[in-house]
Image (tube, rainbow, N blue to C red):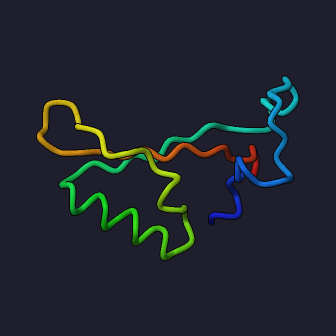
Amino acid sequence: MPECFLELNSPGVEKDSSYAQFLERERLRILIIGSRDGVIETIHDLHGRSFAEVGAWSPLLPAPGSGEVMSILTRDRKRGG
């Protein structure tokens, strides 16, 4: 499954945002909400499964109105991939 995502820092992905490239990509955001320990453990578990590097996730942020924390991973996906 990780192969359907584009790595933004890889040599094959150009940094310019031309219209053609925009049409070929879909921006996805993966959100984890829970206890501090639960979010951190899940991020490390996903890293162990080669889903995403630990450093690719946002810093822990307070989740609105819940007393929990959240972390967000933003990825571009090839459309139709």
Left or right: where does residue 69 sit relative to residue 57?
A: left
Identify the residue at horizontal 50%, vertical 56% (top origin). Answer: 55
Above or below, comparing residue 73 to residue 36 in the picture = above
Residue 73 lies, in percent from the top left, at 49, 47
Quarter occupied by residue 76? top right
Residue placed farthest to the bottom in the image?
A: 48
Q: Is residue 21 above or below residue 39?
A: above
Residue 15: quarter of image: top right
The residue shown at (34%, 50%) is 32
Q: Residue at x 21, y 31 (%)?
A: 64
Look at the image and tell me in which quarter the N terminus lies.
bottom right
Front residue of 68/27: it is 68
Residue 8, given in percent of the width and then of the height, sits at 71, 47
Left or right, 66 with respect to 59, comes to left
Report x, y in % for residue 11: 84, 53
Q: Residue at x 70, y 64 (%)?
A: 3
